Image: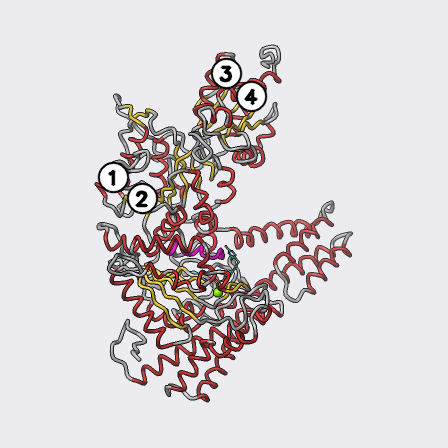
Amino acid sequence: MYMKPNTNTKTEITFEDFKAEVLNDYKTVVTSRECSLLGRREVLTGKAKFGIFGDGKEVPQIAWAKAFQNGDFRSGYYRDQTFMMAIGELSIEQFFAGLYANTNLEDEPMSAGRQMGGHFATHSLDENGEWKNLTEQKNSSADISPTAGQMPRLLGLAQASKIYRNVKDIDATKFSKEGNEVAWGTIGNASTSEGLFFETINAAGVLQVPMVISIWDDEYGISVHARHQTTKENISEILKGFQRDENGNGYEILRVNGWNYPELIDTYQRASQVARKEHVPVMIHVQELTQPQGHSTSGSHERYKDEARLAWEAEYDCNAQMRQWMIANNIASDEELKAIEKDIKKAVRDGKKAAWSAFINPIKAERDEAVSLLDRVANSSANGVFITKLKNDLEAIDEPIRKDILSATRKALRFVVSEASAEKTELQNWITTYINTIQPKYSSHLLSHSNKKALNQTEVLPTYDANAEEVDGRVVLRDNFDAIFSNYPEALIFGEDAGHIGDVNQGLEGLQAKYGELRVADTGIREATILGSGIGMAMRGLRPIAEIQYLDYILYALQLMSDDLATIHYRTKGRQKAPLIVRTRGHRLEGIWHSGSQMGGILNLVRGIHVLVPRNMTKAAGFYNTLLESDEPALVVECLNGYRLKEKMPNNIGKFKTPIGVVETIKEGEDITLVSYGSTLRIVEQAAKELLEVGIHAEIIDVQSLLPFDINHDIVKSIAKTNRLMVIDEDVSGGASAYILDEILNKQNAYKHLDSQPKTLAAKPHRPAYGTDGDYFSKPSVEDVFEAVYEVMHEVNPTDFPKLR
Ligand SMILES: Cc1ncc(C[n+]2csc(CCOP(=O)(O)OP(=O)(O)O)c2C)c(N)n1
Ligand SMILES: [Mg+2]
């Protein structure tokens, strides 16, 4: 058998070196297994809530770790603890810190307790949010739980190597060495049933990127057997057509049994070579794996596996097979291995204890502080007996959580609400301070904390020559993209029809010829992987702009925007970021699927991403300029009906910046404040002109930025003047208009200034019919806006504004 356990450093090794390396590998797999076994017990005895472990998948991960080099990236799922241990990124203590959800990043570096155990990550950013040198470390993009959700991001992580290898002038110092990095994915056999898996596999075959996907095949997806999951019960068999051959590019498809240590090492070395050197994607179907403890702590596999299967799993347990192989090949004796196993058992128990102390001791200290305070409050209060009961109950909890502490202290405060004592003040202050200290452990880092955060970017207005030319809006956008690609070598755009024809509205006209097929690229029709590849590339220091052709089709990508992109910074407590720009166009054209206005749905799903709705192409261009200077993800929705409208050509193209979270008053007035955004503003502006003719002076505010929303609270200032508010929106009622109303009424307290009922004017509950009149009869029209505003004014002053109908 060909054996070369570590090709990174040596070509010739002695048997002693080889033995030592195998023994070391064995120690890792046994440590990992012990963690799984003890982890399960921690859940069953109530110390942890839930556990999902990597038992039964240890040995292949050792082989993979040997092939994994500095600069490489992992995008995997919850079974990969052994790999993380083998690359030195997961200690026993950290494993248990994850299980207990320790909120300290130093103890629990994967997510500071924000993710359940088994969801792995490394740190791409330092404590200031600055990139670390990713070429000098082994990298794991942060896992997510939705099955196959790791696949689209994997594509982008691999694609980044291709860009770095082939596009000149990018400063790759921190990100790549000639594109030699491989992106390694893992997925369970059952999760290959997901559409995201197939979409990614096809896209990587087309793109020819250095991606190696391992399929951990244990024949089950929780209780559901492969016969319900996969045609022919064999994923590599049915994907055979992807094998590269004389007919064209494709994959290298490899199969290996997951219990065969030497063959696994061979297979992973080969995969690494093919992917790294040739940039050919590789699929490794790792078969005959097991689940010694079943799927997770939520159930037992004896319920759905028969005797024969359970017996086979016991025999072919990869660790047991590796052990037998070591004895058969004189690498160690049974006694030696027993001694190793015993030591490891103890080390894992000790590590677990240390992790538990690190988790519970700070909370106990906080509890003790609260108990002593409650004691003082009780002694000074007429309601002392009630407070003493709260104190005693809190003191009696063996393993308190922070909710116990706050619940007791907040309830105690109610008993002293009408008393005046130093202790009461102390309690009030203590609660506030405690919340202020603890809340960030659960809520911080949704957005960037770095100097580059979007809100640090200040406005730069477009400037114009005296005789500035009036051009189609799309020309402003095109020239601005031209400036962007010339100013930022790391910027690139890709999407359906974005390359050769320069997008369906020619906002990228001529730019592929100028910047090449890798930077201005056509993609297949595959929105989820367009989005995902943007995430992966952004995580490796590039500045991708993922184009989704129409807003209506963003629903295909929305799951990943919500589950992956919006949570990256939060779920790593600021140690990873993906400043991806998603470009799309929509609103007010025609038909059920070409006039998308699902803004309410989007707003509710993508907190953590900026949502920007420029009313014209100059504003849109300014947003792109702002975003490229910042480090947060954003969605920009261009007005589909605005590309051919005339706009003056600025003379500082590429330099002006539209601020994020800042509204703009586009018409002043005293009678009522009209709030809207995007394409609908043109309708509102027309209605306002007509209202002026009957003596109604409306003020119009363009929101521009739905997320974040009016950070300076300018809208309430307008309402303080007009005392009336109407939100006009082409989304359904209860959608974006309800969000806007909530922001204005509840967050800006505008209700204080209102003399009339605040109104929303939204679209019909159905999508717009296709016919030319579809828009008029489905979304607010000029007449609708006029009449709705007039009606408000009629209520105020029926003499001057008699009833219209
Ligand atoms: C989108 C989605 N659907 C369902 C689940 C619940 N779920 C978690 S793991 C799992 C089975 C996965 O099986 P497989 O891919 O074979 O991985 P294994 O656990 O066997 O290693 C399911 C259904 C989920 N996490 N995400
Ligand atoms: Mg499985």
- Residue 533 at x, y = what percent? 36, 51
Callout 1 secondary element = helix
* Type of amino acid at the residue the image marks with label 2: Ile
Q: How is the image coloured?
A: secondary structure
Q: Residue at x 40, y 83 (%)?
A: 325
Number of numbered discs on residues: 4
**For this rendering, which residue is in front, 133 or 616?**
616
Q: For the residues marked 4 and 3, what is the alpha-carbon distance in whole angstroms?
A: 11 Å
Q: Quadrant of the N terminus?
A: bottom left
Does the CB distance between marks 1 and 2 fall below 8 Å? yes
From this viewpoint, which residue is outermost toward the front? 232
34 vs 174, left or right, is right
- Residue 489 at x, y = what percent? 26, 46
Q: Which residues are magenta?
A: 145-154
Sequence-first disc among 4 and 3: 3
Does the CB distance between marks 4 and 1 fall below 8 Å? no
Whether label 1 lies within 8 Å of ligand 1 gets the answer no
Callout 4 secondary element = helix
Callout 3 secondary element = helix
577 vs 506, left or right, is right
* Type of amino acid at the residue the image marks with label 1: Leu
The relative height of residue 318 versus residue 556 in the rendered view (above or below) is below
Q: Residue at label 4?
A: 788
Sequence-first disc among 1 and 2: 2
404 vs 289, left or right, is right
The relative height of residue 314 versus residue 636 in the rendered view (above or below) is below
Callout 2 secondary element = strand
Sequence-first disc among 4 and 2: 2
Sequence-first disc among 2 and 3: 2
- Residue 802 at x, y = what percent? 60, 11
Q: Residue at label 3?
A: 691
Check residue 493 in the rendering and tell me which mark sits there, or answer none.
2
